Image: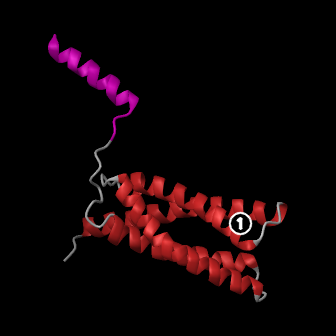
Amino acid sequence: MENKETKFKEFMRALKFTLISISAGIIQIGLFTVMNELLTINYWVAYLTSLLASILWNFTINRKVTFKSANNVKIAMLLVLAFYAVFTPVSTILGELAENSGVNEYIVLAVTMISNFVLEYLFTRFVVYRNSCDTATPTKTEGDVVADSENSNDSEQ
């Protein structure tokens, strides 16, 4: 049985993932809107470009902040790319079909983004980082380095 501390840690991990995903969503919606409204680029090009930008942002921040993983970055990225090798063509084709059938492109984008959010969290938590959450060692800030050097000088005296 999971203890309260573990449940709280997983709740906080999901909350962090959600907040970071919202920021990635803002990037995706913003870029999609610019490409769709100002540049009038067709749906799938705007979708793929904005999706790629949000994936890179989401992966980079979540790896460090949410999952705190020491896993090999290349392996983790390859696993995420494997997820998107399936998700991207399916969502692009279905999105294009829906948009061509008269569904508003922003409704299509919203449904796709919500699906992406849920599936990506499950995949990254239980496949990519299943055994490596919280394995990264905290990095020292500049202030910590100065404090450590002052402490080592004090102990030498």
27 relative position to 37: left or right = left
Task: Describe the element under mark 1 as helix, strand or loop.
Answer: helix
70 relative position to 1: left or right = right
Q: Is residue 67 in sight in this rendering?
A: no
- Foreground of the two, 73 or 23: 73
Which residue: 42% across, 59% down? Answer: 77
Q: Is residue 89 above or below residue 14?
A: below
35 relative position to 93: left or right = right
Indicate whether residue 42 is drawn in magenta. Answer: no
Q: Is residue 156 in sight in this rendering?
A: yes
Q: Which residue is mark 1?
A: 46
Q: Which residues are magenta?
A: 139-157
Q: Which residue appears farthest toward the left when viewing the image?
A: 156
Which residue: 34% across, 23% down? Answer: 146
Q: Main secondary structure of the magenta part?
A: helix
Q: Which residue appears farthest toward the bottom when viewing the image?
A: 101
